[in-house]
Image (cartoon, rainbow, N blue to C red):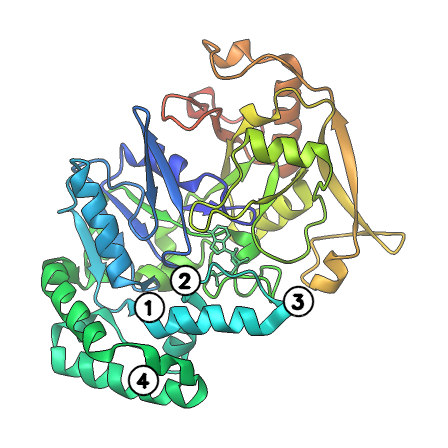
Amino acid sequence: MIVGAQWGDEGKGKITHYMAEKADIVARYNGGNNAGHTVNVAGQEFRLHHIPSGILYPETLCVLGNGMVIDLPVLWKEIKGLRERGHKVENLRISENAHLVMPYHRLIDQWQEGARGDGRLGTTGRGIGPAYVDKAARCGIRAMDLLAPEVFQDCFKRNIADKIGTYPFLSEIDKDEVVREHVQLARELAPWLCDTSVLLCRALEEGKEVIFEGAQGTLLDLDFGTYPYVTSSTALSGGAGAGAGVPPRHLQDVMGVVKAYTTRVGVGPFPTELTDEVGTCLRETGKEYGTTTGRPRRCGWLDAVALRYAKRLNGLTTIAITKLDVLTGQDPVRICVAYNYRGEPLESFPTNPRVLAEVTPVYRDFSGWTQSLRDLKSFDDFPEPCKAYLWFLEDLLGIPATLISVGPEKDETYDMHARGCRICP
Ligand code: IMP
């Protein structure tokens, strides 16, 4: 399991790609093209939205699980983009149970955001929330419906007629064109549609290496994130059971991806947010602009209270620290180790956003370092203050940092698996 331990954008794409080298299968189980997983290979950047981050390995099977919501034309564009760059996508498998994001979902999402005014949630506008609403309301359209064009057409026409009642502007949608486009895409994608739960369970029983790649992050989880400023799916490790159709007993090793500072896109409380020049510096150095929407990300110090919460909810067994290089030049470097709420310390991360909005972070300061981390020969060459920062974080969380990433490329990763666990010798 690879999950985001913060508010998304932790670098799950890079870490999944790194880990996928030895994997047989990489499976996504939640979200859709609200995700933007970036993988860099030999100076080329790939931005994946639906497709799992194992796709650049020709032998790795990549599964879009039933818990995802799929925007077919966008998926097709992603597939074509990969093919044009010489990558094989024949190893893709799409769950026939996955729900489709239809054009009306996207328009409703954008309209709702506009109508919320100051109360907006800051969604990506990709129709994710409305698609999951239809799934829960049992009127969604599933990938399998595409295989029977008349079923798909009936479902689509019934849904859109229904929705036009509430959102008259949807009558602008060219219904025949939507049906035509989807039926044509269904023909292209049909060979990849299958019961992916069967495929995954069989692989797990055979002892194959399967990576489940979470999208978004713990604090955007529908149940345990900073509701209502969350996404509409389960971003936690536990979501992989239902979202990929596998028994939870298979989910043993859970790696939390942790950016060395914190970012958040969209609205909602963010205790360690920096609205000063340090925040601006982190944004510019870390190129903190949304992969999917291009929006500037809000930046702040690392929040270990939130990370302990992520550890508990996901059962994290290790962490991968990303973008450590971005902290070079900061002095001090800070980690939030506790919250105060109305003068009292808080035991754990509050799930009430009104409480979270009022907490004051308690920081532990570390000396900074000026040496670039990107061209060192080995981890031993890391500046001592940087090591102190890492060891403190490991000790605080009680789990080892098994991967340390200092740049976008795969070889800019220090693999600490071999050194064993410093925490529990
Ligand atoms: P939605 O998922 O588009 O409905 O957006 C809900 C919230 O989740 C918004 O604050 C988005 O900015 C955030 N969000 C959704 N997907 C991602 C992601 O992949 N990275 C970071 N934030 C995300």
Q: Is mark 2 within 8 Å of ligand 1?
A: yes
Q: CA distance from mark 1 to mark 4?
A: 12 Å
- Where residue 174 appears, as percent x and y from the top left, is 26, 77
Marks 3 and 4, Cα distance to the nearest angstrom?
Answer: 30 Å
Disc 2 and disc 3 in contact, CB within 8 angstroms: no
In the image, is residue 112 above or below residue 53?
below
The answer to whether the residue bearing label 3 lies less than 8 angstroms from the nearest atom of ligand 1 is no
Of the residues under marks 1 and 4, which one precedes in the sequence?
1
Q: Determine the residue positioned at 27% across, 33% down.
A: 22
- On the image, the x and y values in percent for residue 245 come to 30, 62
| Residue 81 image-quadrant placement | top left
Count numbered badges in the picture.
4
Residue type at mark 2: give it: Arg
Image-based side of 302 in relation to 418, left or right: right
Question: What residue is at 35 percent from the left and 57 percent from the top?
Answer: 29
Query: In 3D space, how far apart are the residues under numbered discs 2 and 4 (Cα atoms)?
Result: 18 Å
* Mark 2 or mark 1, earlier in chain: 1
Q: Which mark is residue 101?
A: 1
Residue 182 drawn at (x, y percent): 19, 69
Q: Which residue is mark 3?
A: 118
Q: Residue at x 47, y 24 (%)?
A: 420
**First in sequence: mark 2 or mark 4?**
2
Q: Is residue 176 above or below residue 246?
A: below
Question: Mark 2 touching mark 1, by CB under 8 A?
Answer: yes
Contact, mark 3 vs mark 4 (Cβ under 8 Å): no
Contact, mark 3 vs mark 1 (Cβ under 8 Å): no
Q: Are marks 2 and 4 in contact (CB under 8 Å)?
A: no
Kind of residue sitting beneath label 3: Asp
Residue at the outermost right position? 343
Residue linked to disc 4: 159
